[in-house]
Amino acid sequence: MTDLEYLDRAEALLKAVEAACDRINENTDADVDNQRVGGMITLVFPNGSQIVVNLQKPLQEVWLAAKAGGFHYRFDGQAWRDTKGQGGEFFADLGRYASEQAGRPLAFAPL
């Protein structure tokens, strides 16, 4: 994948995370605050815990840091897959970790 392709796909991922947070906040009382600075989004939950999603441009990866740990994802041609664990998909993993930290089911998906 070229650097430009990576940036396009990574930007789409960040926009999808922001859109999911907006949808969650509009349709539930989960109150997930999301703050974006450049290539990084910080999700803040009512209990004060956080999830950070950031781009790692030199590696063409997206990193996710949650209470459950740190995870690295690379686009495999179809989805962003965990490169260090069991090959989980980014949006499914984000939903699982966000649900754990929010104490309620939350769903994230690509646009």
Image: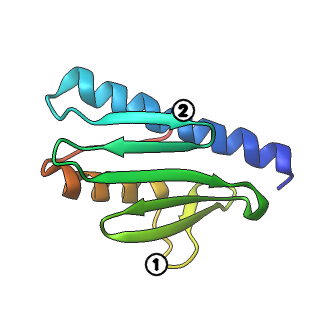
Locate residue 109, reporting x and y percent.
Answer: 42, 42
Nearest to viewer (mark 2 / mark 1): 2
Circle 2 sits on which residue? 15
Residue drawn 21% across and 23% down? 27
Q: Is residue 56 above or below residue 16?
A: below
Please state the horizontal and vertical placement of residue 65, each as a whole percent of the image. 43, 62
The secondary structure type at the circle numbered 1 is loop
- Residue drawn at the location 18% of the way across and 41% of the way down: 46
Q: Residue at x 73, y 39 (%)?
A: 8
Instruction: Give the x, y percent position of residue 18.
Output: 45, 32
Give the mark, 2 or 1, whose residue is nearer the N terminus.
2
Indicate left or right for 89 with 33 as reference: right
**Left or right: residue 94 compared with residue 58:** left
Residue 50 in the image: above or below residue 43: below
- Mark 2 to mark 1 CA distance (whole Å): 25 Å
61 with respect to 82 (left or right): right
The image shows residue 33, relative to residue 94, as above or below, that is above
Dot 1 corresponds to which residue? 86
Instruction: Using the rendered image of the protein, determine whether residue 23 is visible from the camera's viewpoint.
Output: yes
